[in-house]
Image (spheres, rainbow, N blue to C red):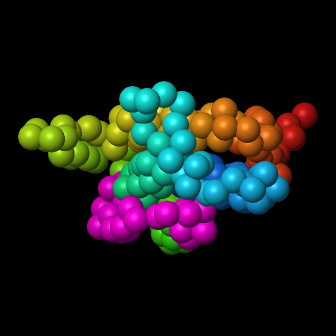
Amino acid sequence: MSISMYEASIPHFIRMLGNLSAILDKVIAHAQSKNIEEFVFVNARLAPDMYPLSQQIQIATYMAKACAARLAGVDIPKYENNETNFDDFKAKIAKAITFLQGIDSEQIDNSYDQPITIKLNDKEVVYTAQIYLLDVIIPHFYFHVTTACAILRHHGVGLGKKDYINRDLCKTTVIG
């Protein structure tokens, strides 16, 4: 049995963005307990030449909603990147999740061979929807969510794999 384009994308984006929002709740509690201003975390990074936490969250959120929109053949929702605190980021994540929840499987399940054109600087790159999802978006999306978690853990927030995966939000089926 093959997996649908919908099942390979939307539920995973929703779950991981939900996990990221729950992680931000832990950051808020950590910052309050340690009397650390939120901007310290918002601007944190692992290395001087990398994007800060704020951009990691913005990129992950954008990639999920842009991918869903492109696969569904609808306009990508435009959100400002003007977040300054964790409530702003949680609101951005919630808007993205709401958009994703509005995508129906029928809108994207048969999109696997549809062309997806992405403008990169001064050129356009064309992918099939399946290659776009599996080889472009999924690795980038998970990279930015993982990097956000790594930044926070590096800066003292008590996070682990359980927070990242958050199995409480997973649908599980036991076989056998």
Depicted 101 relative to depicted 145: above or below: below
The reply to whether residue 111 is visible in this rendering is yes
Task: Find the residue positioned furthest to the right.
Answer: 176
Q: Residue furthest left?
A: 122
Which of 17 and 111 lies nearest the eye of the viewer? Answer: 17
Does residue 88 show up magenta in the picture?
yes
Q: Quadrant of residue 90?
A: bottom right
20 magenta-colored: no
> Within the image, what quadrant is residue 80 found in?
bottom left
Q: As displayed, is residue 75 above or below residue 14?
A: below
Q: Front-most of 76 and 109?
A: 76
On-image quarter of the C terminus: top right
Q: Nearer the viewer, residue 90 or 168?
A: 90
> Visible in this render: residue 8?
no
Q: Is residue 97 left or right of residue 120?
A: right
Q: Which residues are magenta?
A: 68-91
Query: In x, y percent, where is residue 39?
Result: 55, 55
Give the residue at x 29% y 39%.
128
Q: How many marks?
A: 0
Q: Quadrant of the N terminus?
A: top right
Could you tell me which residue is drawn at 47 percent across and 42 percent down?
52
Residue drawn where x is 10% and y is 39% of the image: 123
Which is nearer the eye, 133 or 162? 162
Residue 58 position (above or below residue 51)? below
In the picture provided, is 43 more to the left or to the right than 127? right
Q: Residue 63's spot in the image, x, y percent?
A: 42, 50
Q: Is residue 22 left or right of residue 129?
A: right
Q: Position of residue 112 (x, y in %)?
A: 37, 44
Rendering coords of residue 120 (x, y %): 19, 41
Rendered residue at 49%/63% (across/down) = 84
Would you say 14 lies left or right of 171 here? left
Q: Residue reaching furthest front?
A: 35
